[in-house]
Amino acid sequence: MTPGLDIALLLGAAVLLVAVGAVRLSTRLGVPSLLVYLALGVAIGEGGLGIRFDDVELTRALGFCALIVIIAEGGLTARWSTLRPVLGLASALSTVGVVVSIVVVGVAVHLLLGLDWRLALLYGAVLSSTDAAAVFATLRRLRLPPRLVATLEAESGMNDAPVVLLVVLLSHEGWAHPWWYEVGLVCYELGVGAAVGVGAGVAGTWALRRAALPSAGLYPIAAVGITVLAYAAGAVLHASGFLAVYVAGVLLGNARLSHRQAILGFADGLAWLAQIGLFVLLGLLASPGRLDAAVLPAVVAGLALVLLARPLSVAVSALPFRVGLREQAFLSWAGLRGAVPIVLATIPLSERVPGAERLFDVVFVLVVIFTLVQAGALGPFARWLRVTAPTEAAEIHVETAPLERMRADLLQVEVPPGSRLAGVHVDELRLPLGASVTLVLRDGVGFVPAPDTRLKTGDSLLIVATAGVRDAAERRLRAVSRRGRLARWFGEHGDEVPG
């Protein structure tokens, strides 16, 4: 080992361990962990320990690699049964909504900050993408209706693809082709990217189901490798690799592969590592001495984004779909920005676009300020809008061989104040065959319930449900939580006549 490498490993390991420990602290304080990671990067950079790092090209390359892993994990953990009903709305938000957001932010910063049109539209394009890491990490701590969570997660996984294309186009000097050619190019890249993702997902599922790998630890590596292959294949075909990654991840994650829980656990760990490395690297790239001058433009651009562009893009995208005003308001507020806009800001910076350095600083400051405000207020805002779902079953990712053999999932259900689950006997839940309450946690004590055990407010239920009946079990639990023991069998709302 060389002394330089030893020091690098020492510093890297120390930063990684501090970042891992900071996750628990940030959760307790209600501060998004990405801000802690950015702060770590700034602390060890030129304004802190004095480490100078200004390699934009390397940051861009490593940032793209990290986004591949983060988006792959989002696809692998997405459930098709909840994703399918919102696919149209998520696609509209990722395409039409992106265009609306770019135009609104571009016009606003052009008029308010006096930027030329090209740079103003670059601001809009860079800021139009919601961040998968920020969305996944924040939403999964809240109990929300599956429709809202699936919409936001699908949007954050899909909108990187068109945004990257638009940022690259705007970063090049002039338009090399007519506008209709550029529009056709974007459509081609998205269409072929989706097709590549489907092909990789289907082929990967077929191979993993038939492969007899000598070690269980090889299955997670192979699954993640397939998603990376999807990105590379899409990129080689000049298509959207990010969309290919997400589509391939969704197909693999819903294929009920062997060692599925191990695959999800491995992908989750890789995604955390990618987030930590990416945010620390971006913090390291930032120059604290320049950030003061970026505060005012960041606030102006952020207010235009949060108060005008995002609500308008949600309203326009939701026109063909039945989305209530309260849901639209929540979708507007929950469009979180994170590492993705900062990574996208490195594209015009590496292309030496005039004003790109200020753009990077503004985006960095904007992400810090508005992530802190939006993510911190997301829970109270959801409760104020009454779009929470405290009785919603949440999947617990555990690695247990019996669950693998049963093709089953472990769900956790809470009995909050006001829920009609309170007072219901376990046998009155009438869960479908293949789902059963295996444990009740009450006042810190767990016990195996009997059929006549009466549920109480504050109870936590652990339910094992096979893949084939999980959705039916969740519908039944929703029905009982709303209608009590007299809820009908079919229908989420418990008010339909059984067939």
Image: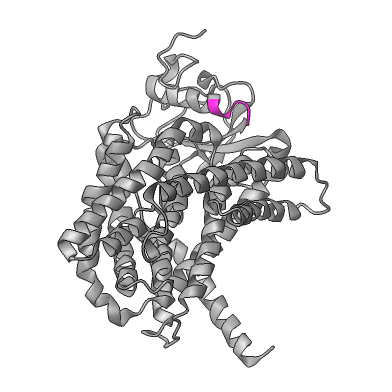
Q: Residue furthest left?
A: 112
Is residue 85 positioned above or below 262 on the image?
above
Q: Residue at x 46, y 28 (%)?
A: 455
Q: Residue furthest bottom?
A: 3
Q: Residue at x 24, y 50 (%)?
A: 104
In the rendered structure, the answer to whether residue 168 lies left or right of residue 105 reads right
Q: Is residue 332 visible?
A: yes
| Render colour scheme | one colour
Closer to the camera, 88 or 268? 88
The quadrant of the picture occupied by the N terminus is: bottom right
- Where residue 419 appears, x then y in whole percent? 37, 29
- Where residue 250 appears, x then y in whole percent? 58, 42
Count of number-bearing discs: 0
Q: Main secondary structure of the magenta part?
A: loop
Q: Is residue 334 visible?
A: no
In the rendered structure, the answer to whether residue 167 lies left or right of residue 6 reads left
Closer to the camera, 128 or 399? 128
Residue 142 sits in quarter: top left
Q: Residue at x 70, y 40 (%)?
A: 404
Q: Give, as a single range, the part of the protein colored magenta.
A: 467-471
Residue 127 among those drawn in magenta: no
Closer to the camera, 124 or 149? 124
Is residue 139 positioned above or below 370 on the image?
above
- Where residue 119 appears, x then y in whole percent? 29, 64
- Where residue 173 appears, x then y in whole percent? 37, 66
Q: Residue at x 40, y 65 (%)?
A: 172
